[in-house]
Amino acid sequence: MNDIMTGESKWAVCRPTQRERARMAMRSETVTAAIIMREGKVLIGQRHRNSSYPGSWEFPGGKMEAGETPEECMARELLEEMDIRVVVGERLAQVSHTYPDITIELIALKCEFSEDEISDIGCETHAWVAPNELSEYDLLPPDREIAAVLFKEVEEEGRLSQDLF
């Protein structure tokens, strides 16, 4: 809007703050997470002590590479990180989480595997945990969000998690 007399704009020019510029330049990653159930428990892995967020727990998975589908990523990551071959099923949930330096789009996929042995190649250790015990583990924020989405109705309806899978 211009002032009729002077022709000058009455609106201030808005420039992004340094924080807003940093957010605009923030990188974004799409990451997959395997939801693997066995005997009513879900598989989680503990991050290596030399990784970002050391000692935190997460659903196994990893970053998608260029040209890769979430399903391809999931199969590759589980083979690389835990030496297991999986059948990747349906997408169960998707959440977005912003850290100070990155935004993560986390896609949870139902996975099945029949092997008994899991190798902790890309994680410190792993655990099979009842869904109602996940809150006792230091899950990364996006993994906590996935757990809340997937297992909330289990708690509310009193069903076993395996009923959902």
Image: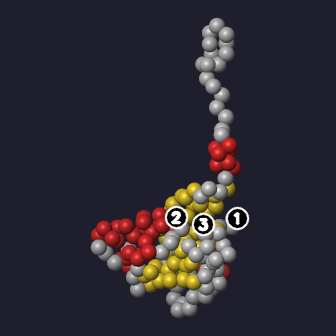
Residue at 38% x, 79% y: name it: 162
Tag nearer the camera, 2 or 1: 2
Q: Nearer the viewer, residue 113 or 144?
A: 144
Q: CA distance from mark 2 to mark 1?
A: 25 Å
Q: Is residue 75 visible?
A: no
User: What is the crowding at mark 2: few (fewer than 14 residues within 10 Å), some, or many (at least 20)?
Assistant: some
Side of 157 relative to 141 (left or right): left
Task: Verify CB contact (< 8 Å) between mark 2 and mark 3.
Answer: no
**At which x and y percent is residue 91?**
50, 68
On residue 141, the disc is 2
**At which x and y percent is residue 33?**
55, 71
Q: Which residue is mark 1?
A: 66
Question: The disc labelled 2 sits on which kind of residue?
Answer: Pro
In this rendering, the answer to whether 143 lies above or below 19 is below
User: What is the crowding at mark 3: few (fewer than 14 residues within 10 Å), some, or many (at least 20)?
Assistant: many
Q: Is residue 56 visible?
A: yes
Q: Which residue is mark 3?
A: 31
